[in-house]
Amino acid sequence: MTSYHTVLFDLDGTLADSVRLILDSYHHTLAVHELPARTDEQWLAGLGTPLTAQFSPWVDSPEQLQAMIATYRDYNLSHHDARVSPYPGVVEMVQRIRRAGFRTGLVTSKNHSGALRGLKVIGLEETMEVVVGADDVTNHKPHPEPVHRALDQLGTTAAGSIFVGDSLHDMYSGREAGAHTGAVLWGPFSREHLHPSAPDHWLETPDALVALLGA
């Protein structure tokens, strides 16, 4: 069994129960800009990628893209603190991992400032040694750059690291970076959905990660 020294986490759908707010923010944005509606399932397919990627099918100019992103963020941030919470057992999981001496980092497709706000709302702002957001990298998940960036900032290597996330994009990003991967099943996606990414570990509950790490 691999001996891990570093744990990287995704945020939305992994630590933060925020997916319903994210979906509602997408729906609101299309409605405001008088664009055809999409289903939850269509939006979920791109969950874990930046807003620029999610809105790109509708935009004809950089100005239109920025307008849609502004609409999304205005709605999302105005409802954020009231509608985002940690998944049950997640706070205790991360705290145990930190107490056991593991290095920790957050790798998210949210912008850096939004990620810090999310961590604060769910009570984990002091637990991540590094935070890598969408505006910290050139290439976003599923590209390996965000994971490489977090590992470089921590001064650790991919060997002995595990990236814990809820989406295919997380799993592909971690694997391409040379890290092991842990697919959480308490988020929005099922084992069937995540199966093509062949994660190294399936994590049914937060306690399963604690047990895997021996924390």
Image (cartoon, grey):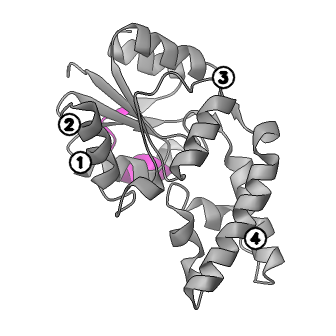
Q: Residue at x 82, y 75 (%)?
A: 31
What distance separates the C-alpha of mark 3 from that of mark 2? Answer: 28 Å
What distance separates the C-alpha of mark 4 from that of mark 2? Answer: 38 Å
**Three-letter code, disc 2:** Ala
78 or 175: which is nearer to us?
78
Q: State the SS at label 3.
A: loop
Tell me how many marks there are: 4
The mark found on residue 158 in the picture is: 2
What distance separates the C-alpha of mark 1 from that of mark 2? Answer: 7 Å
**In magenta stretch: residue 13:** no
The mark found on residue 29 in the picture is: 4
Q: Which x, y percent locates residue 92?
A: 57, 14
**Three-letter code, disc 1:** Ala
Task: Answer with the quarter of the image where residue 124 lies.
Answer: top right
In the picture of the structure, the residue carrying the numbered disc 3 is 88
Choose mark 3 or mark 2, whichever is in front. 2
Q: Reading the chain from its start, which is encountered first: label 3 or label 2?
A: 3
In the picture of the structure, the residue carrying the numbered disc 1 is 177
Q: Reading the chain from its start, which is encountered first: label 1 or label 4?
A: 4
Q: Are marks 1 and 2 in contact (CB under 8 Å)?
A: yes
Q: State the SS at label 2.
A: loop
Q: Reading the chain from its start, which is encountered first: label 4 or label 3?
A: 4
Q: Which residues are magenta?
A: 193-201
Q: Residue at x 71, y 57 (%)?
A: 23
On the picture, is 211 further left or further right than 12? left
The N terminus lies in quadrant: top left
